[in-house]
Amino acid sequence: MSEKHLKTGDSLPPYSGKLRLFAMRFCPYAERSVLVLNAKKLAYDLVFIDLDNKPEWIFSFNPKGSVPVLEYEEGKAIFDSTIINVYLDEKYPEVPLQAADPLRRAQDKLLVELFAPAQSAYYTAAFNAQALTPTSAETYHKGLEILQKEIESRGTTYLAGDQPGLIDYTIWPFLERFLALPLLGKTDFAIDQSKYEVLLKYIEAMKTVPAVKSYCLAPETHSKFTESRVKGNPDYNMLDTSDVVCCMRPRKKKE
Ligand SMILES: N[C@@H](CCC(=O)N[C@@H](CS)C(=O)NCC(=O)O)C(=O)O
């Protein structure tokens, strides 16, 4: 798999007959769908696109031009991580990822909603630091506390139970990125052991999940990409190598 991001003027690769996901390597929403495809062991092609110089054809799959987009049949696509993931779970039920119990499904959706403000605070801290206010870190920690409490009260290794489920794959991409904030100088966004013992144990468990392991990136990598984006020149292709391995760090650029 190439990690190269296709850009304006690049042609659409030929359709192989497999499911195809259009993504951006550092997009947390796209990661949600990658994790679901991996967890379900579905065969798929992954095509990365440069979000600052989008290939024209992306708009024929998604008029909004955002990722992720799932091409489920040649030329036919759906978009939005939540919509894609529920579709995949219903279409390919062999490895079910949504909770079977309607109440638990509702509670999972509520957790995603209650966690969302922490995601927004992360975006501000990472990409728009001048807009940070004292309440940003508070909002972020409130989201983490709600998550930790939920993990504790469910009493299982993963939110979904003894195995990870859709709720875990929905929240994880953000936790992966939150770990980069102290490297970006945002020390008040650190996830400290003293306060977050249960959450950190959960994070460690998630890192061992095969679907996650094969795609996750180290905090150093997220931090490098974030810095490049903040400088106005996102380095989409920093991992462009055929031998990408889990949690890899950015390669040293040749002088
Ligand atoms: N609600 C969407 C959000 C997707 C999203 O914001 N994707 C970003 C990249 S992380 C994107 O495509 N941004 C470029 C754009 O919107 O033009 C989802 O869950 O898929």
Image: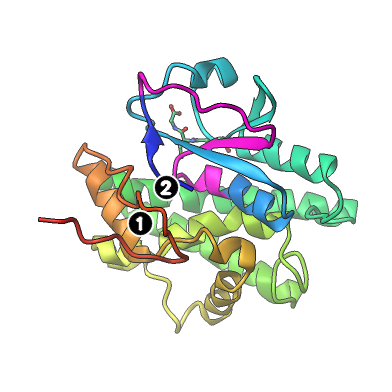
Instruction: Please state the extent of the stretch shown in magenta in the rendering.
Output: 8-31
Residue 26, numbered circle: 2
User: As shown in the figure, which amino acid type bears the numbered disc 1?
Assistant: His
Verify whether residue 17 appears in magenta: yes
Judge: label 2 CB < 8 Å from ligand 1. yes
Q: Residue under circle 1?
A: 222
Q: Residue at x 77, y 54 (%)?
A: 107
The residue carrying pointer 1 sits among few (fewer than 14), some (14 to 19) or many (20 or more) residues within 10 Å by Cα, namely many
User: As shown in the figure, which amino acid type bears the numbered disc 2?
Assistant: Phe
Task: Provide residue 6's location: percent of width, then percent of height.
Answer: 39, 31
Considering the numbered disc 2 on the image, is that residue within a helix, a strand or a loop?
loop
Q: Which colour scheme is used?
A: rainbow
- Disc 1 vs disc 2: Cβ atoms closer than 8 Å? yes
State the image quarter where residue 75 is shown.
Answer: top right
Nearer to the camera, 83 or 246: 246
Residue at the left extreme of this rendering: 255
